[in-house]
Image (cartoon, grey):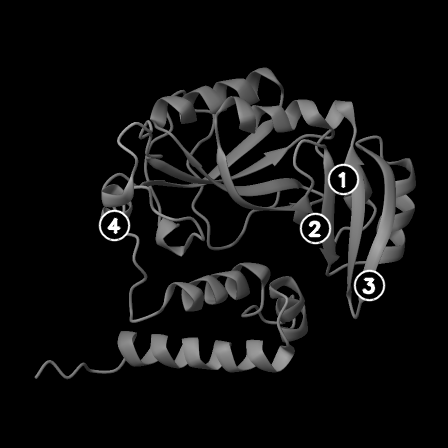
Amino acid sequence: MSRDHDDEAPDSNAEEPNGSDADDPRDSDADDPRDSDADRRRDPNLPHRPYAIFVRAQLSHPDLPLVPALGDAPEMRVRPRSALPGTARLFVVGTGGDHASFEAGLVDDPTVVDPSLVGERADRRVYRVDVADRAREPLSLLASADAYVHDASGTRDGWTVRMELPDREALVGFVRECRAADVDLTIRRITDTEGLDRRHDYGLSADQGRLLRLAYEAGYFDVPRRVSQTDLAESLDLSTSAVSQRLRRATAELVANALLPRDDS
């Protein structure tokens, strides 16, 4: 199984996952349920169940959605764009590979039903698929763990997910369930988030932090780049010029606050 070069993966075969890494949930799009303002606004009758574990993990199994088709296009990566609530229909964006080979594989992919191409621009295409029954079983492990999935991406090696779990007991149960279902689980990072201040550091606004995180994870800063500013603009429904300006401002803010001496006077 391939691994990202900057990941340190704890042994997912351990009964009790331990250790933590630098996958900071402050980079998440999610609102912090422990935020003090939210605490003041919370309905006292509403149960409070903060999620305490942030996990980045890769799941590999031949019945995961689109994995067979992705095997025909080794460089392709797909990311969910939207889903219809209450259905198993997904819209995914495919980038970085041979779309023709991927689409040929979709026709015979047993994990999806009724695939179709719904959008196309430059080197990215948007597909609509219905998830087959056999592919819903490995995905149900996330629901069983009560996982709050922030984002996901699929390749021929499986699906990488960034998610929050209620507690370590839920994480241990997730590991056990994956093992019982013969799903190969690689835990890349674990972070305890209880009591963590999630405000963005280095003077970045929440929007700037989200943009830089998205650009980083999508491969914009890779050499060579895996996505362009046009790709980022499409995923954010912005113009390319707007993304360019926002990236420059966010990067300048980050450099100014992280690398330059501060005037504390």
CA separation in Å, label 1 and label 3: 18 Å
Q: Is residue 252 above or below residue 80?
A: below
Which label lies toward us, 3 or 2?
3
Q: Earlier in the sequence, mark 4 or mark 2?
A: 4
The answer to whether marks 2 and 1 mark residues whose Cβ atoms lie closer than 8 Å is yes
The residue sitting at 36% across, 21% down in the picture is 169
Q: Which residue is mark 1?
A: 66
CA separation in Å, label 4 and label 2: 36 Å
The residue sitting at 29% across, 46% down in the picture is 38
Left or right position of 235 against 23: right
Q: Amino acid at mark 3?
A: Glu
CA separation in Å, label 3 and label 2: 14 Å
Which label lies toward us, 1 or 4?
4
Q: Which residue is mark 3?
A: 120
Tell me the SS state at disc 1: loop
Q: Amino acid at mark 2?
A: Val
Q: Is residue 24 visible?
A: no
Residue at the limit of the structure toward the top, as seen here: 180
Residue 228 rendering spot, x and y as whole percentages: 65, 72
Q: Earlier in the sequence, mark 1 or mark 3?
A: 1
Q: Which residue is mark 2?
A: 78
Q: Amino acid at mark 1?
A: Leu
Residue 135 rendering spot, x and y as whole percentages: 73, 28
Assign the N terminus to one quadrant of the image.
Answer: top right
CA separation in Å, label 1 and label 4: 41 Å
Which label lies toward us, 4 or 2?
4
Using a 10 Å C-alpha cutoff, classify the residue at mark 2 as few (fewer than 14 neighbours), some (14 to 19) or many (20 or more): many
